[in-house]
Image: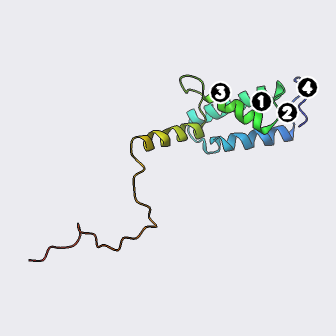
Amino acid sequence: MSSRNPDQYLDSEDISLLVEILKAAGYSDAKEKDERGEKLAAARFLTDAIQRGVLTKAQLTAALRKRGDAPGGQNQTPAQTKTEAINRWENEGGAIARSPFEHSSKPDMARTPLSS
């Protein structure tokens, strides 16, 4: 990557990397005003990091994740928010459903009329 000097502007490689990281973090679907503001704040955070010399995808991704792990969760990425919600749902017993690929050989007793 060419942004080795902090005073240097971002180049096309830097911008491509920034877009890729934002997309992976779940910001690609930002439609609402608040979501666009969060995406802009994350993009500014990553831009500052690149200008400070954080140059690899792994480093930038880790920095964005760490930013979202801060107390209060106000800077969570959409991916972090979704993962947290899914984990909470699973911990509360939401993932008990039978697989749609399983077939039961027994008839559904709730739908079978009783014969007299």
Of badges 1 and 3, nearer the viewer stands 3
Disc on the earlier residue, 1 or 4: 4
Q: Report the side of 70 relative to 7 (left or right).
A: left
Disc on the earlier residue, 4 or 3: 4
Extreme left residue here?
116
Could you tell me how far apart the alpha carbons at marks 1 and 3 are, in whole angstroms? 14 Å
Report x, y in % for residue 53.
84, 27
Could you tell me how far apart the alpha carbons at marks 2 and 1 are, in whole angstroms? 8 Å
Q: Nearer the viewer, residue 91 or 3?
A: 91
Could you tell me how far apart the alpha carbons at marks 2 and 3 are, in whole angstroms? 21 Å
Residue 19: name its quadrant.
top right
Q: Nearer the viewer, residue 47 or 108?
A: 108
Of badges 4 and 3, nearer the viewer stands 3
Residue at screen point 54% across, 37% down: 81
Could you tell me how far apart the alpha carbons at marks 4 and 3 are, in whole angstroms? 23 Å
**SS at badge 1:** helix
Query: Is the residue marked by circle 4 packed among few (<14), some (14-19), or many (20+) residues within 10 Å?
Result: few
Above or below for 95 versus 77: below
Q: Are marks 2 and 4 in contact (CB under 8 Å)?
A: no
Could you tell me how far apart the alpha carbons at marks 1 and 4 are, in whole angstroms? 13 Å
Of badges 2 and 3, nearer the viewer stands 3
Q: Are marks 2 and 1 in contact (CB under 8 Å)?
A: yes
Residue, disc 1: 47
Could you tell me how far apart the alpha carbons at marks 2 and 4 are, in whole angstroms? 10 Å
Residue at screen point 76% across, 37% down: 58
Residue, disc 3: 67
Q: Amino acid at mark 2?
A: Leu
Q: Which mark is residue 5?
A: 4
Disc on the earlier residue, 2 or 1: 2
Q: Report the side of 98 relative to 81 (left or right).
A: left
Residue, disc 2: 10
